[in-house]
Each structure stands twice: as C-alpha cells, then as structure tokens.
Amino acid sequence: MQIVSVNVGSPREVPWNNITISTGIYKKPVTGDVAVRKLNLDGDRQADLTVHGGRHKAVYGYPAEHYGFWRDEFPAMPLTWGYFGENLTTTGLREDEVCIGDTFRIGSATLQVTQPRLPCYKLALRFGRDDIIKRFLASRRTGFYLSVLEEGTVSATAGIEVLERDSVQVTVCDIITQFLGMPDKPEVLERVLRLKALPQDWKLELTARSKARAKEQALIEHGEFEPEEN
C-alpha cells in the first residue's frame, strides 16, 4: 500500500449552467513532502466549507486502481491523478476492504477513515456531464474521507501502514450500499450505528432512508402504493 500521487489546489471561478461558481475540485499533483494539517493539506483549500472540508473531511483519498475503469468508461477524457478531486491517489486501499474507523500511518501522518464521498454537482462540472453523479455512486468507486489524528507529511511513493482495524467492520462500500438501499440490510445498519468514526449526520440519514424504504415496502405489500417506474 502506498501513495501514488499527492494532489492539491485552490478554489477557482468557473462557469456552470449560466452562472459562475467557486470550486476546489481541480487538483494537481505536487512533488516533495506536503504537510498534513488537521483540516487540510498545505496548498489545498475548499470553496464551500459548509459541505466540504472540516475535521471529518480533512483529506480525500481515491484508489488509483479505479482510474482504469473510468478511462474505459470515458476514453476521450484526460483522467490524470487528482481528477476526482482527491488529495491522495492510493494503491491497496479499496472501498470493499477499507472500513470506517480504520487508522493508517500515511507518510508520517496518522489518518482515520470517516466516510465515503458523496458527489455533488461539482463532480458533474469537472466531467462536463450530469450522469457522472449517478454513475459514480452506482459504481461504489467513491473513495473516502479521512480525519487527521496526528499531523505529519506525505509525498508520492510514501508508504501506507495499517495501525488499527475498526472492530465493527463496516466497509466504505457497505455504507454506500446501505445509502442506496441495494439491498437494504438491517444488520448492517445496526453495526453502522455503533461506528465511532462515522459522523452523526450519516447515521441519521441512513436510518431515515431505511425507515422510508421499510414503510414503502409495507405499503406495496398491502397494495396501497405503486413505485414509480424509472
């Protein structure tokens, strides 16, 4: 397990649907040691701090292994490291194996996995297509956010060491599957609610979605509700 690329960027103004927005999704690889702070990497900033950045989203990691999949999906696009807005492009950390709460030493910093990435319209802006948001989630190739437990430095080719695996064992992919309800697994939700590293808003959202799906299913079984056709 190691870092393939460290990527940072400052917010920039870009046109989108006849308006101008500020976004920090445009990241570029940098060389040398980069300091990892409690809220971000040196040289990296977020545009909208109400939904991006913060203690639980200090660093965004994305598996380099997924780039081959997306290059096959979009062969005309120049998918260079950092294209998904990730700070760390990694190898050996896949969403179906990495668990919420897992702690790693990455470079000389200590980081903990907190949550999957839920894409917003700025990913659509980056790709120039609205369907990327749905496809990104459906692929389960979301990457994950990490909090910084101990500051340090990271650099391309730096190693990644497992310090602790979370005992509840809920993977990043489990969270996305539960979010989408494909399938809905009450036993997973029970374990989700025991996760210390997962932010409370995720727990509330997953609980609400599960209850809504259960209510809908009950209405269907009683012939009182017909789901909309896609």
Image: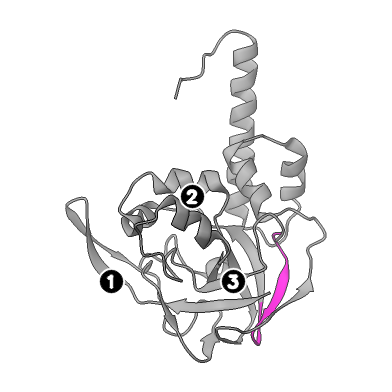
Does residue 109 belong to the magenta stretch? yes
Q: Earlier in the sequence, mark 3 or mark 2?
A: 3
Find the magenta span and give its range. Answer: 99-110
Crowding near pointer 1: few (<14 within 10 Å), some, many (20+)? some
Q: Extreme bottom residue here? A: 32
Viewer-nearest of discs 1 and 3: 3
User: In the picture provided, is 16 more to the left or to the right than 76?
Assistant: left
Q: Mark 2: which amino acid?
A: Phe
Image coordinates of residue 138 in percent, x first then y, are 53, 43
Q: The C terminus is located in which quarter?
A: top left
Image coordinates of residue 218 in percent, x first then y, are 65, 17
In the rendered view, tell whether residue 56 sits above or below residue 172. below
- Say what secondary structure mark 3 lies in: strand
Q: CA distance from mark 1 to mark 3?
A: 25 Å
Could you tell me how many numbered marks the image carries? 3
Q: Residue at x 56, y 77 (%)?
A: 4
Front residue of 50/64: it is: 64
User: In the picture provided, is 190 more to the left or to the right than 175?
Assistant: right
Q: CA distance from mark 2 to mark 1?
A: 23 Å
Per the image, the residue denoted by label 1 is 12
- Say what secondary structure mark 2 lies in: helix
Q: Which mark is residue 90?
A: 3
- Say what secondary structure mark 1 lies in: strand
Q: CA distance from mark 3 to mark 2?
A: 18 Å
Residue 204: which quarter of the image?
Answer: top right
Does residue 166 belong to the magenta stretch? no
Per the image, the residue denoted by label 2 is 136
